[in-house]
Amino acid sequence: QKEVEQDPGPLSVPEGAIVSLNCTYSNSAFQYFMWYRQYSRKGPELLMYTYSSGNKEDGRFTAQVDKSSKYISLFIRDSQPSDSATYLCAMSGHLTGTASKLTFGTGTRLQVTL
Amino acid sequence: KAGVTQTPRYLIKTRGQQVTLSCSPISGHRSVSWYQQTPGQGLQFLFEYFSETQRNKGNFPGRFSGRQFSNSRSEMNVSTLELGDSALYLCASSREGDEQFFGPGTRLTVL
């Protein structure tokens, strides 16, 4: 079993919909949680970064972390066709030292249709 | 501020050859990490360099190696290429204790 599980999709939603993307993990040492967006043939772009449990909002994006359930979510409000991309969750135990390496989910491919 | 740059962007090699990929981090970033991305395995951590020292290493064979120079630029080398090494190789840089920012990647095809 992988340390981080993520539904690969594809997930297809109409423009304007609320999108919910999720990851589960098994390593209780993870404390730092990130969401990256990756367009086709590009490198991942950091969207959101959260430490420990709680919510964080940035514009149309909200990241949630529930450490007790080992479950993280990314919500996208008022989805746009430009949001069509692969969304990767990533996590680490620390930001420095030997536990700073990122462990990624496999990514969820999102398609927002007109 | 310039982002992470990687060269070359595309490479085609044959089995048994070796390859060297280059990464220039964001100015001021001293940590450089390398990842391999494939459709089957996703993004997998290769290794991290900080101040010219390898600080972290993933579960890859010894054919995969890297180094970092005093200006924080990094190179990774893959020797005796195998078909399964075909992948997008991504470099990420960060300040100590900060988020990682990725480059566009080098797409390696092994024939």
Image (cartoon, helix red, strand yellow):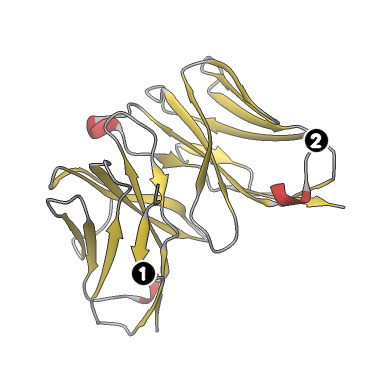
Residue sitting at 18 percent across and 61 percent down?
B62
Residue A75, given in percent of the width and then of the height, sits at 69, 30
How many discs appear? 2
- The type of residue carrying mark 1 is Asp
Q: Chain of mark 2?
A: A
- The type of residue carrying mark 2 is Asp
Residue sitting at 54 percent across and 64 percent down?
A41
Q: Chain of mark 1?
A: B
User: Is the residue marked by circle 1 packed among few (<14), some (14-19), or many (20+) residues within 10 Å?
Assistant: some
Q: Secondary structure at mark 1?
A: helix
Which residue occupies the foreground of this view, A45 or A14? A45
Which residue occupies the foreground of this view, B81 or A114? A114
Q: Is residue B92 left or right of residue A57?
A: left
Residue sitting at 52 percent across and 59 percent down?
A42
For residue A55, which numbered disc appears in the image?
none
**Circle 1/circle 2 CB separation < 8 Å:** no
Q: Is residue A38 left or right of residue B107?
A: right
Q: Secondary structure at mark 2?
A: loop
Residue A94, given in percent of the width and then of the height, sits at 32, 26
Residue sitting at 41 percent across and 70 percent down?
B9
Residue A79, given in percent of the width and then of the height, sits at 78, 40
Note whether B34 is above or below B21 in the view shown. Answer: above
Q: Which residue is mark 2?
A: A78
Note whether A66 is above or below A105 in the view shown. Answer: above
Label 1 vs label 2, nearer the camera = 2
Residue B95, given in percent of the width and then of the height, sits at 29, 35
- Tell me how far mark 1 sits from mark 2, CA to CA: 39 Å
For residue B85, which numbered disc appears in the image?
1
Does mark 2 fall on the same chain as mark 1?
no
Which residue occupies the foreground of this view, B37 or B28? B28
User: Is the residue marked by circle 2 packed among few (<14), some (14-19), or many (20+) residues within 10 Å?
Assistant: some
Which residue occupies the foreground of this view, B8 or B58? B8
